[in-house]
Image (cartoon, rainbow, N blue to C red):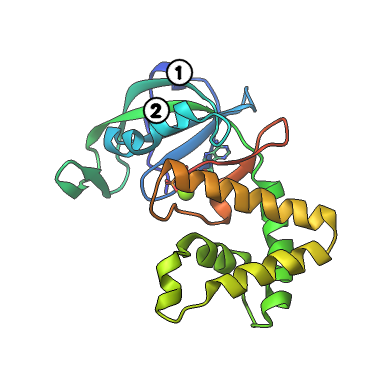
Amino acid sequence: MKLLETINNEFSEGRSRTELGSGVDHMVFTATDDSNIVYKLGPKIAIDYWFNDFKKNPNLFPKVYKRGRTTFKLKSEKSIPTKKGYKTFPVGTIIPLDYVKLEKLDTDRVQKEWDLLSDISEEIREIDGYEFLDFLIVYMTWRPENKERGWNDDATIDMFDTEMKKRGSQIYKLFRSYVDLVDNLKKVKPGVPDIHRYNFGYDKNGKLKCLDF
Ligand SMILES: Nc1ncnc2c1ncn2[C@@H]1O[C@H](COP(=O)(O)OP(=O)(O)O)[C@@H](O)[C@H]1O
Ligand SMILES: [Mg+2]
């Protein structure tokens, strides 16, 4: 969806930009004159949800360089989160938004790695279409009390550890890098973080980070 019409401040006229993606709550742009940076725009309430955690944990999330306010005019009707829940605003409404200037991560590398880890996960579980995400969900929702309810995720988790190890140190290291990051995310946001292949990326030093939760 191309919602953006006027963005002031850093996005002022004449500065070229490319839309990288937009989810339910945010729009993300790169300034094409600086490939190391993205601008993430969203309602204040959406930005507040992650901003402080990102700022406090630059090892887990893209570095935060700046936060500011801007406005834009809706080009199509849009449902936007407000303090009173989602509200639909008509075309032409000028809405205030916050923006954050963030470190840009490499997301292509993650796509390739997820394909590889998904192939291996399917092999390990011997279930058609079983993906790495399926394993991560098992891993994240693991609780000691599940066992009492007859749910043995320990076996799956142990099996993945053993089988990933068998595939060599490079694969095992890759597998662990995602699992370790997910462990750390759980500490920052208890409950189940929003993990899927489009929410991760690598920084310039090759560190895996989470770009959205
Ligand atoms: N720091 C970043 N570096 C590179 N790409 C990003 C970054 N932040 C967001 N993106 C891209 O924009 C998309 C949408 O951003 P995201 O933060 O996931 O917003 P939403 O909450 O709307 O899902 C992401 O899936 C990713 O492709
Ligand atoms: Mg996202």
Q: Nearer the viewer, mark 2 or mark 1?
A: 2
Residue 60 appearing in the image:
yes
Q: Is residue 128 left or right of residue 51?
A: right
Residue 117 x/y as whole percent: 71, 63
Kindly identify the residue that appears in the image at 56 percent across and 62 percent down: 136
Q: Mark 1 points at which residue?
A: 10
Given contact means CB atoms under 8 Å apart, are the residues at marks 2 and 1 in contact? yes
Q: In this view, does 59 lie above or below 135?
A: above
Work out which residue is located at the far left of the displayed protein and give it.
Answer: 84
Within 10 Å of disc 2 (Cα), the crowding (few <14, some 14-19, many 20+) is: many
- Near-viewer residue (37 or 182): 182
**3D distance between C-alphas at marks 2 and 1:** 10 Å
Q: Name the residue under label 2.
A: 99
Under circle 2, the secondary element is strand
Under circle 1, the secondary element is helix
Res 7 quadrant in image: top left
Q: Which of marks 2 and 1 is nearer the N terminus?
A: 1
Q: In this view, does 213 lie to the left or right of 175?
A: left
Q: Is residue 202 above or below residue 180?
A: above
Q: In this view, does 30 lie above or below 149?
A: above
Kindly identify the residue that appears in the image at 53 percent across and 35 percent down: 61
Q: In this view, does 126 lie above or below 13?
A: below
Residue type at mark 1: give it: Glu
Residue type at mark 2: give it: Tyr
